[in-house]
Image (cartoon, rainbow, N blue to C red):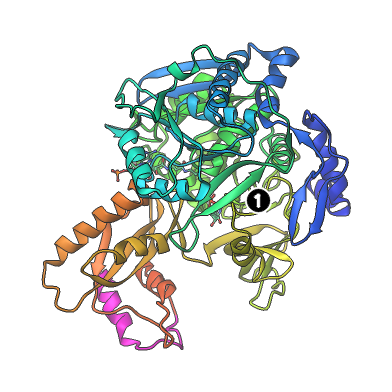
Amino acid sequence: MGYKDVYEAWKADPEGFWMKAAECIDWIEPPTRALDASRAPIYRWFPDAVCNTCHNAVDRHVEAGHGDRPAIIHDSPITGTKHVITYAELRERVASLAGALRARGVGKGDRVVIYMPMVPEALEAMLACARLGAIHSVVFGGFAAHELAVRIDDARPKAVIAASCGLEPGRVVPYKPLLDAAIEEAAHKPEFCVILQRDQQPAALIEGRDLDWHAFQVGVEPAPCEPVRGTDPLYILYTSGTTGQPKGVVRDNAGHMVALSWSMKNIYNVQPGDVFWAASDVGWVVGHSYICYAPLIEGCTTIVFEGKPVGTPDAGTFWRVIAEHKVRSFFTAPTAIRAVKREDPRGELAERYDLSSLQALFLAGERADPDTIRWAQELLGKPVIDHWWQTETGWAIAANPLGIELLPIKPGSPAVPMPGYDVQALDEGGHPVKPGELGAIAIRLPLPPGALPGLWNAEERFRKAYLEHFPGYYETGDAGMIDEDGYIYIMARTDDVINVAGHRLSTGAMEEVLASHPDVAECAVIGVADELKGQVPVGFLVLNAGVDRPHEDIVRECVQLVRERIGPVAAFKRALVVDRLPKTRSGKILRATMAKIADGAPFKTPATIDDPAILDEIRAALGR
Ligand code: COA
Ligand code: AMP
């Protein structure tokens, strides 16, 4: 069957399609039906299934006789170490950790926040929670204490699992002081913390609250896999929205397993035993789906890579890892390939390695520019597959389904919708636009298995943010078009979310931080095009009347404030002091127009602008 047949088969019988896909999962009680639409537009998949995700990701492979197969390869060019964990070892380690958590009272439905770098223990912590039916919430290590505190207050975890430190090239990032500061700031106090001490910088433990990762497991009974309902939450992953309050995207157990397993076969074209590598971070959705759960559910070997595309030690690291571990499918963000290309434009480092194991390179996380795709394609002589998805969906909305058939690649397009996704470009009135015309990209409800059933404790926000604007659809927040062949093009966001080096960030959150500076009266943050990172944030500051301190000092303090409050990952390095901000007559800041000026792109002066002369001032401030 080709792609068209598979997509049509799904359209003709969506529930039958997913019931069939569900056969690849080991159920405690198999689902008797696929979709629960009784609370539409809120949907649930596999409502009567009983299962355990950790069993499917770990135990079942050992029980099937594959205990000796490598489950995780930790490759850390930063520490110069490599380490293999087999499925049998993984089961032992996860059952022991789960047993220790259970002995401290962690059980079904309890939340556990995980704040860890790229070490196998991060995956073990996630799987241990899944084993108990506890709900994990991983927070990316590049976020600062305040962001961690916001997530602790929203998820209200019983425990936090953290490492003493993370490692960035040339510097140790002490996590423990950030964790301590976050717990201090948060109104909710976790009962205990489990700390993985790393040799590079062990942390002082707080008596009565902090437990050592190894010591607290001594003598505990390993925990078995707890049966959970298919619709029970597996995890919460916070992602940036328009405001400083992140959205807690919820993932269920059953739909998630079914969708990920389907995607491994049909999109990434891997079989049990193949080596799969997603060079991302466990703190992002790519890390959840394709470093941890999907490769393990499928019985593949996953690579946990603690390094960067360049500088650890050079721009040949990706190729070294692929050759050494015989990676079959490789997944990273376009920005990482751009970083490699910048350092090694002729791809000389790649020539040193045998890349014959690799069948394709997959890119996602931001728009993949055609130049980068062509460069990688020429270098590798393999298909370079752009695919589009979001934290909310958990797996690709649009892709080129290599496991079904490789469709013609059109650089600039993440190809075609996957089964489960009826994607439309809509006009303001909610009507599909003509092929090739720009519209708001929306997905007809219900979303498929694996996509979010809702936001953590925020059903009203879920409805408002995603379901209300276009009734009957999920609003993706992306704008783009669909061509005559059904290929989708994702061009920009329709909200104030920006994408910096494949990381999704809220300009609203940065504005909240800048506004808290005592000299700042008003501010705006926009995303400006950047050759390496896709976009970088730039702040515009209007100062309080009478402030006569040097502007450089205020800018420096603002840059530092964003780093301290949001984290280094925001990459907020540039702010400009201006007299006024361009606004509409009703007072809305014209961020999109400012971004166009910054990018040197053509724009129309909005008819609703209060004072067009301000645009000249913005242009001058930007040196445009
Ligand atoms: N813990 C602590 N700090 C972190 C961190 C972490 N886990 N991850 C990043 N940071 C810090 C970096 O050290 C850097 O700090 P600096 O301002 O002091 O230099 C800052 O956050 C920005 O990091 P990053 O976005 O990684 O930029 P970079 O300039 O260090 O590297 C790239 C540029 C392109 C190499 C890098 O962005 C990259 O590898 N991108 C791929 C992204 C990716 O895989 N995204 C996942 C989506 S699929
Ligand atoms: P995140 O939730 O962090 O994965 O970010 C999701 C957003 O990243 C999407 O809504 C898009 O704006 C952008 N994005 C992800 N993948 C792609 C892609 N392949 N092409 C264009 N934009 C993408």
- Please tell me which residue is depicted at 40% across the width and 37% down the height of the picture: 346
**According to the image, label 1 marks what residue?**
452
Tell me which corner region of the image, top left, top right, bottom left or bottom right, holds residue 508.
bottom left
Is residue 369 visible in the rendered image? The answer is yes
Q: In the picture shown, does residue 261 fall above or below 95? A: below
Measured as percent of width and height from the top left, residue 85 is found at 54, 16
Q: Residue furthest front?
A: 208
Quadrant where the C terminus lies? bottom left
Residue nearest the viewer, comparing 434 with 559: 559
- Please tell me which residue is depicted at 54% across the width and 46% down the height of the picture: 237
- Please tell me which residue is depicted at 36% across the width and 23% down the height of the picture: 198
Residue nearest the viewer, comparing 470 with 213: 213
Instruction: Specify whether 362 is left or right of 215.
Output: right
Q: Is mark 1 within 8 Å of ligand 2?
A: no
Q: In the picture shown, does residue 397 fall above or below 303? A: below
Instruction: Specify whether 486 is left or right of 336.
Output: right
Measured as percent of width and height from the top left, residue 362 is found at 58, 40
Task: State which region is magenta.
Answer: 604-624
In the rendered structure, which amino acid carries the disc numbered 1?
Leu
Mark 1 closeness class: few <14, some 14–19, many ≥20 residues within 10 Å: many
Residue nearest the viewer, comparing 376 with 42: 42
Measured as percent of width and height from the top left, residue 408 is found at 68, 48
Q: Is residue 616 magenta?
A: yes
Is residue 214 visible in the rendered image? The answer is no
